[in-house]
Image (spheres, rainbow, N blue to C red):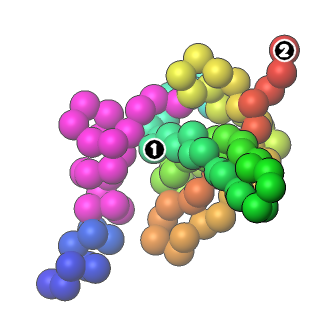
Amino acid sequence: MSLNDDLAADIASGNVFYDIDSGFAENATKASGEVVPVVFDFEYLGSDTGELTIGSRAPRCWIRSTDQPAIGSTLTIRSVLFSITHAEPNGDGESYLYLQKVLS
């Protein structure tokens, strides 16, 4: 079995990335109240134009495609409510969700 096959099997089974206790995942709560594992990313994006540096945060998360809520619905991660703006499925049973903080 190749490394790619091993990784795909681990991802599909949820043994590595989506294990809350010993993996990289943390709990997220769907609008329905269902709790699902996600790998949350709150990356800082910086751009240097020469005279001015512009930065922003882009909240995103990996989720198993079978757990993915609909676009426009919400997820609560780390006690913060996010709206799902769009998703990018990777073809291996996962999706990368782009999130936007819901202002109260």
Where on the picture, by quarter, is residue 76? top right
Part of the protein shown in magenta:
10-28
The residue indicated by pointer 1 is 39
**Residue 69 can be seen, yes or no:** no
Q: Residue at x 59, y 57 (%)?
A: 96
Q: Amino acid at mark 1?
A: Val
Give the CA distance from mark 2 to mark 1: 24 Å
Q: Residue 83 — which label?
A: none
Residue 24 within the segment the image draws in magenta = yes
Q: Residue at x 65, y 64 (%)?
A: 88
Q: Is residue 3 above or below residue 69?
A: below
Image coordinates of residue 9 in percent, x first then y, are 27, 68
Image coordinates of residue 82 in percent, x first then y, are 71, 32
Image coordinates of residue 33 in percent, x first then y, are 61, 22
Circles 2 and 1: CB atoms closer than 8 Å: no
What element does badge 2 sit on? loop
The residue indicated by pointer 2 is 104
Q: Residue at x 65, y 32 (%)?
A: 75
Q: Is most of the magenta stretch helix, strand or loop?
A: loop
Answer with mark 2 or mark 1, whichever residue precedes in sequence: 1
Q: In the picture, which quadrant includes the N terminus?
A: bottom left
19 sits left or right of 101 in the view = left
**Residue 13 can be seen, yes or no:** yes
Q: Nearer the viewer, residue 56 or 81?
A: 56
Residue 13 within the segment the image draws in magenta = yes
Q: Is residue 102 above or below residue 38?
A: above
51 sits left or right of 81 in the view = right
What element does badge 1 sit on? strand
